[in-house]
Image (tube, rainbow, N blue to C red):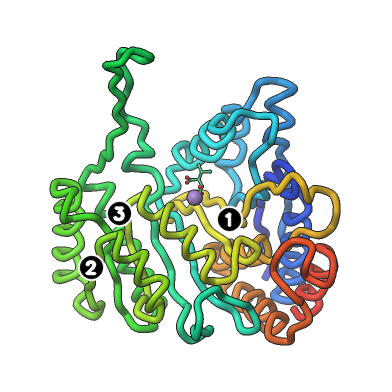
Amino acid sequence: MSKKTYNIALLPGDGTGPEVLREGIKVLDAAAAKYNFTINYTSYDLGGERYLKTGETLPDSVIEEVRKTDSIFLGAIGHPDVKPGILEVGILLKMRFALDQYINLRPVKLYPGVETPLKDKGPADIDFVVVRENTGGIYTGLGGAVQVGTPHEIATQVMVYSRPVVERCIRYAYEYTRKRNKRKQLTLVHKMNVLTWAGDLWHRVFSEMGNEQYPDIKQDYNHVDACNMWFVKSPEFYDVIVTENLFGDIITDLGAMIQGGLGIAAGGNINPEGVSMFEPMGGSAPKYTGKNVINPLAAICAGGMMLETLGENEAAKAIDEAVSNTLASGKIKNLAAGRMGMGTSEVGDLIALKI
Ligand code: IPM
Ligand code: MN
């Protein structure tokens, strides 16, 4: 049988993005060699530098090319000389919408040997996954402003959800909970006590679908504000969480902190029927650029998530175990940039070697 080949689009992006992506690729290549598949990479130059030079963010021609790939691997987007919002909306959100990446998958997992700010909590307590709806809600961009600059100025930004958009997200979350096969518990996070219409839609879809199609999954519900408290007080309570876009954006940053920080937090923008994009959650960290001090583990973990989504489950598991064992060994002193006790490329070497 001929070797399976994957075509991956690389978006190294800005700042430390290219450095962390390089280590992610190193580990992907090690996994490919061991598990007998091939990866072809095509790199696309997007980000702040290109925008400042040409005014382009994400050209349609690039969208059409990446649409034909198996997956996208992103470093970081963000440039100190570009006004906030331009690159985020023009590249990241545009890609999510164009490729209909309607799930944002964010594992919150404390690896052994990693310090969490939560007192008395360990790896057994912090191991859950957030399924964030990734294209709807307030991010849809419906709304507007009138009489701007006057004392009567009005601005709206609407939390829009259609039933099908809610359904496909909740279905993904139930399926994921079943496949994860841990506590088989799915927690819906919303704000039903105030957002009575939108919350009611989410909750009805959640319970109807759960009762009819997923009787093996325990249903649970948290208000989003309470969920924040529980992340800190009792994270062991969670298995899988499903939530709307903005709430998911907010709780996953807290999730990143309790798992040890942005150095280790990875995420996937997933279209289960199409092309997905995987990324470390940390930004472009301009002040660390080119210094070989940034932590590449989040990018390495994002690469693992990519392989899992492509169906290379064994290779994905090998990456996760290599990260876990390396961290447990205590060789990497700290997850923060400049405090790892080794350089960016040495961390990549260590993980690749373990594979
Ligand atoms: C994230 C980011 C993005 C979001 C920004 C950069 C547009 O915060 O991926 O969580 O809000 O979704
Ligand atoms: Mn965010």
Of the residues shown, which amino acid type is indicated by label 2? Tyr
Q: CA distance from mark 2 to mark 1?
A: 26 Å
In the picture of the structure, the residue carrying the numbered disc 3 is 168
Task: First in sequence, mark 3 or 2: give its number.
Answer: 3
Q: Secondary structure at mark 1?
A: loop
Q: Is residue 103 left or right of residue 44?
A: left
Instruction: Indicate if the residue with disc 1 has its beta carbon within 8 Å of ligand 1.
Output: yes
In the picture of the structure, the residue carrying the numbered disc 2 is 221
Q: Position of residue 297 (x, y in %)?
A: 69, 66
Q: CA distance from mark 3 to mark 1?
A: 24 Å
Q: Is residue 222 visible?
A: yes
Camera-nearest residue between 277 and 262: 262
- Total marks drawn? 3
Q: Secondary structure at mark 2?
A: strand
- Would you call the spot at circle 3 few (<14 residues within 10 Å), some (14-19), or many (20 or more)? some
Camera-nearest residue between 225 and 217: 225
For the point 35% across and 73% down, which residue is it?
177
Q: CA distance from mark 3 to mark 2?
A: 18 Å
Quarter occupied by residue 334: bottom right
In the picture of the structure, the residue carrying the numbered disc 1 is 281
For the point 39% across and 61% down, which residue is it?
131
Task: First in sequence, mark 2 or 1: give its number.
Answer: 2
Q: Is residue 253 left or right of residue 36?
A: left
Disc 3 or disc 1, which is closer to the eye? Answer: 1
Position of the C terminus by quadrant = bottom right
Instruction: Indicate if the residue with disc 2 has its beta carbon within 8 Å of ligand 2.
Output: no
Q: Position of residue 55 (x, y in %)?
A: 66, 21
- Would you call the spot at circle 1 few (<14 residues within 10 Å), some (14-19), or many (20 or more)? many
Of the residues shown, which amino acid type is indicated by label 1? Met
Above or below: residue 299 compared with residue 58: below
Q: Is residue 314 visible?
A: no
